[in-house]
Image (tube, grey):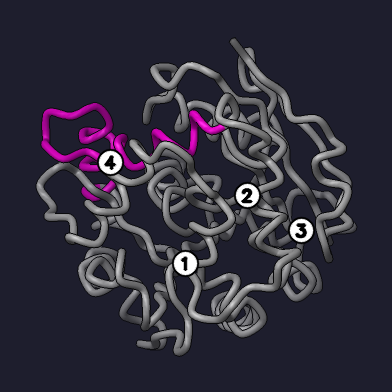
Amino acid sequence: MVLSIPEERFEDVPDFDYEPQYVDVGELRMAYVEAGGADGDGDEETFLCLHGEPTWSFLYRKMMPTLAERGRVIVPDLIGCGRSDRYEDRDEYTVEMHYDALRTFVEELDLQNITVVCQDWGGLLGLALAANQPERFARLVPMNTGLPDGTQEMTETWHAFAEMVATAEELDIGELVANGCYHDLPANVVEAYRAPFPDERYMAGARTFPGLVPQSPDDPGADLFADAQERLAEWEKPAFVLFAMEDPITSDNRDPLRNLIPTASEQPDVWIDDASHFLQEDAGEEIAARIVDFVDRTS
């Protein structure tokens, strides 16, 4: 069964007055918000901001105003997240489904000259798409993410997180996000992360994301990410790797990813201080300013 989120769930979301729009990606609708970008001639800077699990486009609210001063900002909700439609059946969620939905979204909007800003699962999917459609992408900004091809070793922290998300009798999405931040979140922000999940029926996507990470080269999705690694090892366009200093989940991926992409070493070697896994919450304004500087110096 396909579920849609009642819009009234989002009435009290703070500081996020963007009108939702929708793209059909097969039998589901993918929601997104947009800011900036007045000319629409295809030559403008386009920032495609991709969130991870279990957040939604709201995660980028601190970054969108700064990025919108420089170009067009497109921030979708992955399937099963935010305002996007979702399957109730966990078995419907696969790496292929998520990748195909994002690919269709980008193709339907015919996005060009993309600087992809991507974190967590947004990075897995966004980097893979950029590797396969390089003609659409101008720059990469991977943050707290990686390209797991099944040969990597995941941290104990990640394994504990994955088991908890999959099996917890009650899953508090707001608490999950709050625990992944360095700074305390206001109560209304925590509630905003709970908003897309009225009850357990709506949580299948959030429940399944960790289990989709390939743990063996034979797992579904491993080939996609291994191929993306090979393609990105020959990437010639600018790339700026931005990781949070205090992220216990993905910080080990930072140097391997920076070493993988040849052009990444041409950009500043920085960590984002006082920030954890959801660095957009902890340091969104700083990160957005760094990304605009990156675009300016590589234009």
**Residue placed most toward the observer, 21 or 56:** 56
Q: Are marks 1 and 4 in contact (CB under 8 Å)?
A: no
The amino acid beneath tag 2 is Trp
Mark 3 and mark 4: span between their CA atoms?
Answer: 31 Å
* N-terminal label among 2 and 4: 2
Checking the image for residue 179, the label placed there is 1
The spot of residue 80 in percent (x, y) is 57, 32
Q: Residue 70 at x, y = what percent?
A: 75, 72
Q: Residue at x 24, y 62 (%)?
A: 157
The earlier-in-sequence mark between 1 and 4 is 1
Q: Quadrant of the C terminus?
A: bottom right
Return the residue at label 2. 56
Gap in Å between the C-alphas at discs 2 and 3? Answer: 19 Å
Residue that label 3 marks: 72
Near-viewer residue (124 or 181): 181
User: How would you rate the neighbour count of disc 3 (Cα within 10 Å): few for under 14, some for 14-19, many for 20 or more?
Assistant: many
Q: Which residues are magenta?
A: 203-230
Image quadrant in which you'd find residue 165: top left
**Separation of disc 2 and disc 1 at Cα?**
16 Å
